[in-house]
Image (cartoon, rainbow, N blue to C red):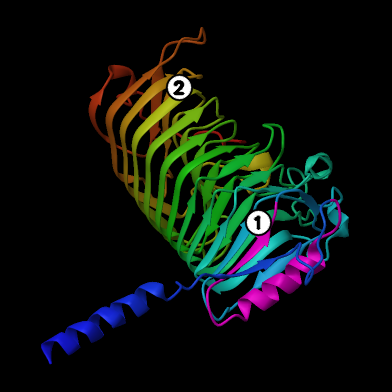
C-alpha cells in the first residue's frame, strides 16, 4: 500500500510539473486582428485592443511594438476583469495642434482601473512646442484647456514604470483620485522654457510613491495639490524646472488638507526653486499642510533651495490681501547639502494670520559662490528649531513686517 501511495504521489508531482504556467494573454496592436502600422494612426487599433484585453477574465497585456505611431487621442477605461498591462515599446506621437483633440485637457487617459501596469520602455511624445507658444494662462485666468500628456484618474494598486513622457503640451502626468500607485523609472523631459509642463502633478490621492526617476521640465518637477496624503518621493533627479513643490494651495474654496509628504534622497540641479511649499495669500477657505519632511537632498546651483512661500501670487492673478488661510506645521528640512545660485538660500515666509509651527532646520550645508552678497536666510512669522546649521541660516533677519507678494 505504501509503495502504491508513493507512486501516486510521484505521478501527481510529474503532472503538476508538466502543467504549463498561466501567462498573460497578449493583445498586440500590430497583429492581424487590430492592424496597426508604424507611421499611421493607431487610435482605433489601440482602443479595440484595450477593450478586448480589459474584458479578459485572466491577466492581459496590450503591446505596442517598437516603431513610431500616430495617436490622435485615447482614454482607456475600466473596470477590467483582471490585472491589465499596457506595454508601450515604441513611440506614440500626439498631434502637434491641440485643437484636434475632442477632450481638450487630455491626450492619453487611464480611468477607473485596479491593478494597471503601464510599462515597456517606450515614449509618449506630446509634440508640445506649438502649444507652449500659444499658452496665455500666465495672463489670462480664463485661458483654454491644454492637454495633459498622461492623465491617471481613479486608479488603485497600479504601477507606471519604465516609460518616457516627452514635450507635453501642459502637465506631463496628472494624478487624481488615485490610491496605492507607484511611479518608477520614469524619464520626463521638456525644455526649461516650456510653460506649465509640470512633470507629475498629484491631487486628491493617497499612498503615491514616486521613485528612481529623472524629471526635467519648464515648471515643477513634482507638484502636490490639496487632499494629498502619504506621498513619498525618493531617488528623483530634478532639473531643469521649478523644483519639488507642495502646492500651490489655497487658491480655491473648500480645499482639503495635505498630510504625510516625504521627499528623500533627491538631487536638484539648476532649478528656479528647490524644496518649496507655496500658498496663495488670499485663500478663500482654511486648510492645513502638515507632516512634510525633506531629508538627504543635494542641491546643485539651485535658486531658493529651501522655501516656504505663503505670499505666492504668480502673474499677479490674485487679490493682494494677505494673509493666507493655509496653516503649515510639522515641517522638517534635514541634511540638505550643495550649492545655492542665490545668496538667499533659506526663505521661510509664513502667513501673518496663521504662523508656521514646528518647522525644523537640521544639518543644512549650502554654499554660494556668486557676487550678489553674503549667504543669508530670511524668516517671517515662524520660529524654526535650528541645529547643525551655519550662522547665516539662523534666521537672524526674522521679522513680522509685511513682505511683498512673490511673482513666481
Q: Is residue 249 left or right of 43 when viewed as pictured?
A: left
Q: Residue furthest left?
A: 2
Seen from the viewer's position, the closer of residues 129 and 311 is: 129
Rendered position, 86 above or below 270: below
Residue sitting at 71 percent across and 68 percent down?
75
Q: Sequence order check: which comes first, mark 1 or mark 2?
A: 1
Q: Residue furthest top?
A: 371
Indicate the secondary structure of the residue bearing disc 1: strand
- Nearer to us: label 1 or label 2: 1
Seen from the viewer's position, the closer of residues 12 and 3 is: 3
The residue wearing badge 2 is 344
Does residue 333 appear in this view?
yes
Q: Count how many numbered circles sit on residues in the image.
A: 2
Seen from the viewer's position, the closer of residues 163 and 65 is: 65
Residue 140: percent from left, percent from top: 78, 48
Residue 387: percent from left, percent from top: 22, 29
Q: Quadrant of residue 151?
A: bottom right
Rendered position, 378 above or below 39: above
Q: Residues within 10 Å of mark 2 (few under 14, many from 20)?
A: many
Are circles 1 and 2 on residues that touch, CB within 8 Å?
A: no
| Distance between mark 1 and mark 2 Cα atoms | 36 Å
The residue wearing badge 1 is 150
Rendered position, 299 above or below 70: above
Magenta residues, as a range?
39-65
Amino acid at each position: 500500500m505504501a509503495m502504491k501511495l508513493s507512486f501516486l504521489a510521484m505521478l501527481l508531482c510529474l503532472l503538476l510539473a508538466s502543467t504549463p504556467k498561466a501567462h498573460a494573454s497578449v493583445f498586440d496592436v500590430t497583429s492581424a486582428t487590430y492592424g496597426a502600422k508604424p507611421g499611421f494612426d493607431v487610435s482605433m487599433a489601440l482602443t479595440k485592443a484595450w477593450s478586448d484585453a480589459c474584458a479578459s477574465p485572466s491577466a492581459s497585456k496590450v503591446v505596442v511594438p517598437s516603431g513610431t505611431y500616430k495617436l490622435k487621442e485615447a482614454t482607456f477605461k475600466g473596470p477590467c476583469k483582471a490585472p491589465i498591462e499596457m506595454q508601450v515599446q515604441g513611440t506614440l506621437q500626439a498631434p502637434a495642434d491641440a485643437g484636434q483633440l475632442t477632450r481638450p485637457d487630455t491626450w492619453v487617459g487611464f480611468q477607473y482601473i485596479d491593478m494597471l501596469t503601464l510599462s515597456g520602455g517606450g515614449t509618449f511624445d506630446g509634440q508640445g512646442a506649438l502649444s507652449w507658444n500659444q499658452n496665455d494662462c500666465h495672463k489670462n485666468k480664463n485661458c483654454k484647456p491644454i492637454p495633459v500628456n498622461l492623465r491617471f484618474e481613479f486608479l488603485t494598486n497600479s504601477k507606471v514604470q519604465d516609460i518616457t513622457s516627452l514635450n507635453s503640451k501642459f502637465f506631463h502626468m496628472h494624478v487624481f483620485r488615485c490610491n496605492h500607485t507607484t511611479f518608477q523609472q520614469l524619464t520626463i523631459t521638456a525644455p526649461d522654457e516650456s510653460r506649465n509642463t509640470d512633470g507629475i502633478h498629484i491631487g486628491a490621492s493617497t499612498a503615491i510613491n514616486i521613485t528612481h526617476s529623472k524629471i526635467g521640465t519648464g515648471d515643477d518637477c513634482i507638484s502636490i495639490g490639496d487632499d494629498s496624503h502619504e506621498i513619498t518621493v525618493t531617488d528623483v533627479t530634478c532639473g531643469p524646472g521649478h523644483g519639488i513643490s507642495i502646492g500651490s494651495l489655497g487658491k480655491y474654496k473648500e480645499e482639503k488638507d495635505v498630510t504625510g509628504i516625504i521627499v528623500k534622497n533627491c538631487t536638484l540641479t539648476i532649478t528656479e526653486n528647490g524644496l518649496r511649499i507655496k500658498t496663495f495669500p488670499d485663500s478663500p477657505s482654511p486648510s492645513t499642510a502638515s507632516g512634510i519632511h525633506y531629508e538627504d537632498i543635494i542641491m546643485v546651483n539651485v535658486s531658493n533651495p529651501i522655501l516656504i512661500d505663503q505670499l505666492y501670487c504668480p502673474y499677479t492673478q490674485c487679490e493682494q490681501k494677505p494673509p493666507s488661510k493655509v496653516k503649515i506645521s510639522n515641517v522638517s528640512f534635514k541634511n540638505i547639502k550643495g550649492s545655492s545660485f542665490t545668496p538667499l538660500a533659506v526663505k521661510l515666509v509664513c502667513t501673518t494670520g496663521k504662523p508656521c509651527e514646528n518647522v525644523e532646520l537640521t544639518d543644512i550645508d549650502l554654499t554660494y559662490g556668486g557676487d550678489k552678497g553674503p549667504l543669508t536666510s530670511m524668516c517671517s512669522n515662524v520660529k524654526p528649531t535650528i541645529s547643525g546649521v551655519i550662522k547665516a541660516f539662523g534666521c537672524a533677519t526674522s521679522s513680522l513686517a509685511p513682505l511683498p507678494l512673490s511673482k513666481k
